[in-house]
Image: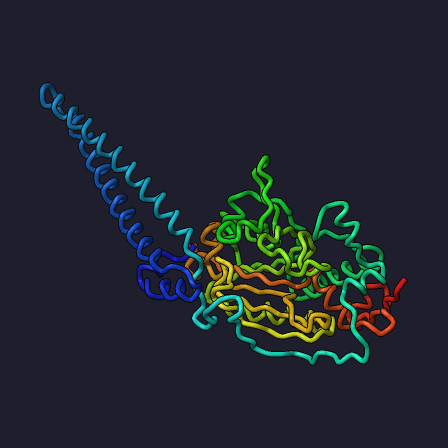
Amino acid sequence: MIDLKALRENPEAVRASQRARGEDDAVVDALLSADERRRAAVARADALRGEQKSFGKQVGRAKGEEREALLARGKELAAGVKAAEAEQSAAEAELTELHRAIPNVVHPDAPEGGEDDYVVLKHVGTPREFDFEPKDHLDLGTRLRAIDMERGAKVSGSRFYFLTGIGAQLELALLNMAVAQATAAGFSLMITPTLVRPEVMAGTGFLGAHASEIYRLEQDDLYLVGTSEVPLAGYHADEILDGEKRYAGWSSCYRREAGSYGKDTRGIIRVHQFNKVEMFSYVKPEDAEAEHARLLAWEEEMLAKVEVPYRVIDTAAGDLGSSAARKFDCEAWVPSQRAYRELTSTSNCTTFQARRLNIRYRDENGKPQTAATLNGTLATTRWLVAILENHQQADGSVVVPQALRPFLGGLDVLKPV
């Protein structure tokens, strides 16, 4: 949730954020009004409770008819307190509903607009010029006996797959390389739950506009995660941290891909299940921007290891998730599509998630303050697309990037079977 104090002090900043996202800014005034009603209701209830407490002392000292009169007045006061508390409860419920409906305040440097209004910050590497017609990752994966989409569909339906033989080894090698980099950088490795409670999913901001993307097990009232960001955010819920925390979460991830019919249905670019190593940081709010830059640098370090051309984009406000104030994506060149496709994403969520999940740290005076949370992708199954296509040879073999070879037992070339 956004900071109510900051909202009261500068409501126009929140209105501007809403407009940048392409959303209604009238909800800001509705939230301000609800905040005023709640504070007024709290003041009334507190005043009546104070009067009731003081009045009780008078009743204790009174006798006879005076006592009877005071008792009658006491009943009136009790009814008034009950009504005031009901009003306070209703006002708090209204405030909470509106408060949770407003997404994070967009960083002032984030571009305005929607999905296509991103800003390219830089290009790294040059797309390769092939002296043969490059195959796509599915053709390559099939010849290598690395990917089996047909049996994936037979077993689980469309957009499921098997990684077989060298395909499974390649993914494990990639993820282990990501783990090695993360732990060397000081991240604590976690293998996280892939089912979470509703309050954790809601706390990270995923049950808003994109709730249709999430698989839900209604009988158990649990959600399948689309990223280990969710359990890693919930890991310290209702806690006061003793300093910065950095975790690298390894998990299977699940996404319904609702509304994406016809988009990238071939191969493993857009699928319902994949594996991922995700970085997650808890820092002080004033350190969040610097941490965001570090997460992006770690992502670029991994991309350099797999030797693929990529670009970094600053995602437009209208394409941000509700919890992100700013997001940078790294998109790798995919030769078969002659386009850049997202491989990593890193978001600065400022205090939005931590406020929902009640995650705090102690400042220099020992006073609890709301922490900031950030996340960033370090490797996913989709990376296999870029690796296979960019390093393919005319005979259908694939050269293994130098940095990845030690994680594949020294193998330097993947050969068709």
Looking at this rendering, what residue extends furthest in the left direction?
65
Image coords of residue 167 (percent x, y): 80, 59
Above/below status of 232 relative to 21: above
Say which of 67 and 43 sits in front.
Answer: 43
Image coords of residue 274 (percent x, y): 69, 54
Quarter of the image with the C terminus in it: bottom right
- Residue at the (66%, 74%) spot, across then down: 310
Relative horizontal placement of residue 130, taking residue 252 as reference (left or right): right
Quarter of the image with the N terminus in it: bottom left
Say which of 247 and 169 sits in front.
Answer: 169
Relative horizontal placement of residue 220, taking residue 1 as reference (left or right): right
Image coords of residue 154 (percent x, y): 77, 46
Q: Is residue 43 visible?
A: yes
Looking at this rendering, what residue extends furthest in the front direction?
262
- Determine which quarter of the picture holds residue 328: bottom right
Looking at this rendering, what residue extends furthest in the top direction?
64
Image coords of residue 369 (percent x, y): 43, 57
Relative horizontal placement of residue 416, taking residue 109 as reference (left or right): right
